[in-house]
Image (tube, rainbow, N blue to C red):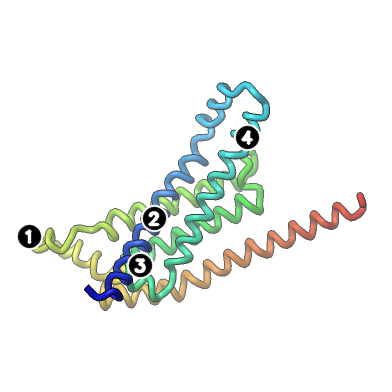
Amino acid sequence: MNPGIISKALEVWTLQNLLNLAIMLGFIAFGLALVVKYIEGIKQYLSLRVSIELWEATTVVLVDLLLVIIVIVGFLVLNPDIMADIKIAIPFVPVATILMAIALVLRLFYGGHKKSNPNYIRALWLMFVANIINIIGFSLIMEAPSGEYLEIHPSSFWTFIKTHLRSNASPHGLELAQVTFYVCFPLLLLVFFWGFVRALSQIKSSSTQKEPEN
C-alpha cells in the first residue's frame, strides 16, 4: 500500500478522534462546573486545611484546563484543509468552540471561576449551550446513519444531513464549510484578542499596584 495513503489515513484518524475527544471533554468540564454541591460535599471528608485548599484549586483549574484543550482542538480543526478531510458538523462544532472560548475568557480574566461572581453563571450557560450544540452536531450529523443503512432504509432527511452539514461532504458540505470558516475563524480570533487585551490590562494593573510598595 502507498505510504502516502497510510500517512494521510493516520492523520485523518488522529484528527477525527481528537475532535471527538474534545467534544466529550466539553461535557466533563460542564459537569465539573455544574455539580457545585457535590464538590463542596466531598470537602467534608478532607480533614487537613491544605488538602481542602488543594481540592478547591484542583477542581477550578481542571475545568479551565479542559476548556483550554477544547478550544485549542477546535481552533486546530477550524481550517479549510482539515475541514475537508474529517467529518465536522457545521456550523455546529465551530460555533460551540467559540462559545467555549468565551466561557474560558470569562473564567480566566473576569472572575468567572469564582462561584460568587455573576460571570460564573454566564460561563456555565455558555458551556451548556455549547454542549447542546455539540450533542446535536455529533449525534445527528457526524454520526448520522451510514450509507449502507440508507441503502436499505432510504431517508431524505438523513441524506440531506450527510450531504449538506458535514464539512467533508462534496460539494454542499465543502461549500458550507468554507462559509463557516470565513465567519467563525475571525470570530474566534476576536475572542482570543479580547482575552489577550484583558490579560495585558490585568498585568499592567498588577504592576502599577506593586510599584508604590517597592
Residue 164 at what x, y percent from top left? Answer: 27, 70
- SS at circle 2: helix
Checking the image for residue 54, the label placed there is: 4
Binning the other alpha carbons within 10 Å of mark 1 as few (below 14), some (14 to 19) or many (20 upward) gives: few
- Residue closer to the observer: 12 or 20: 12
Front tag of 4 and 2: 4
Using the image, tell me which numbered label, if any, was put on residue 11. Answer: 3
Name the residue that disc number 2 marks.
133
Please name which of the two marks, 2 or 3, marks the residue nearer to the observer: 3
Q: Nearer the viewer, mark 1 or mark 3?
A: 3
Q: Separation of disc 1 and disc 3 at Cα?
A: 32 Å
- First in sequence: mark 2 vs mark 1: 2
Front in this rendered view, residue 175 or 146: 146
**Residues at discs 3 and 4 in contact (Cβ within 8 Å):** no
Label 4 is placed on what type of residue? Leu
Name the residue rendered at 62%, 39% in the picture: 57
